[in-house]
Image (spheres, grey):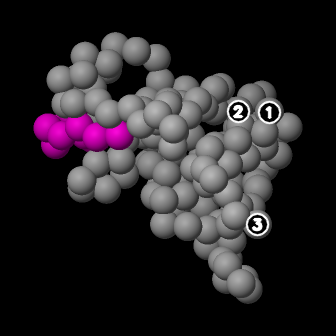
Amino acid sequence: MSQTDPIADFLTRVRNASKAKQKRFTVPSTGVRKEIARVLLENNFIRGYTEIPASPQPKLLVQLRYTPAQESYITCIDRISRPGLRRYMGREELRLGQRDMGMLVISTSRGIMSDADAVAQGIGGEAICRIW
């Protein structure tokens, strides 16, 4: 089955699994999904992820992170840029946005990274999602 927006599908699966208090979930693996999961892992929103070989496409097993009181570290995850309306942010806009709640996942010319990493490198890019 083809999807029109695989990133939104991934974010929806994260959101649904988090609200359902699931410890892990699987999603078809793509390079972009792995990179978003890597950024979420680096910023301690998830416990880990692994790629499981499968036919016809590998699966990505994402393990969610919870507090000792079983509250998810992911309160909200919202898609910003979408296929019908791309949203780009320059480095100054990202720097000023550091006061906002949460973290942005940015697709830059140097790969997918958090907004803090993009500001540190002095670059901007397409804002994929905001998570807190």
| Residue 42 in view here | yes
Q: Are marks 2 and 1 in contact (CB under 8 Å)?
A: yes
Q: Is residue 87 above or below residue 50?
A: above
- Circle 3 is placed at which residue position? 1
Disc nearest the viewer among 2 and 3: 3
- Circle 2 is placed at which residue position? 72
**Which circle's residue, 2 or 3, is located before the other in the chain?**
3
Instruction: Tell me which corner region of the image, top left, top right, bottom left or bottom right, holds residue 28.
Output: bottom right
Q: Are marks 1 and 3 in contact (CB under 8 Å)?
A: no
Q: Are marks 2 and 3 in contact (CB under 8 Å)?
A: no
Q: Secondary structure at mark 1?
A: helix
Relative placement, left or right, of 1 versus 84 is right
Q: Nearer the viewer, residue 130 or 120?
A: 130
Q: Which residues are magenta?
A: 117-127
- Residue 82 falls within the magenta-colored stretch: no
Disc nearest the viewer among 2 and 1: 1
Residue 107, horizontal then vertical, whole percent: 35, 47
Q: Secondary structure at mark 3?
A: loop
Residue 22, horizontal then vertical, whole percent: 82, 46
Residue 23, horizontal then vertical, whole percent: 78, 49
- Within-10-Å neighbours for mark 2: few <14, some 14–19, many 20+: many
Cα–Cα gap, marks 2 and 3:
30 Å
- Within-10-Å neighbours for mark 1: few <14, some 14–19, many 20+: some
Q: Is residue 63 above or below residue 54?
A: above
- Amino acid on which the number 1 mark rests in the picture: Lys
Q: Nearer the viewer, residue 69 or 29?
A: 29
Relative placement, left or right, of 119 versus 32 is left
Cα–Cα gap, marks 1 and 3:
25 Å
Cα–Cα gap, marks 2 and 1:
8 Å
- Within-10-Å neighbours for mark 3: few <14, some 14–19, many 20+: few
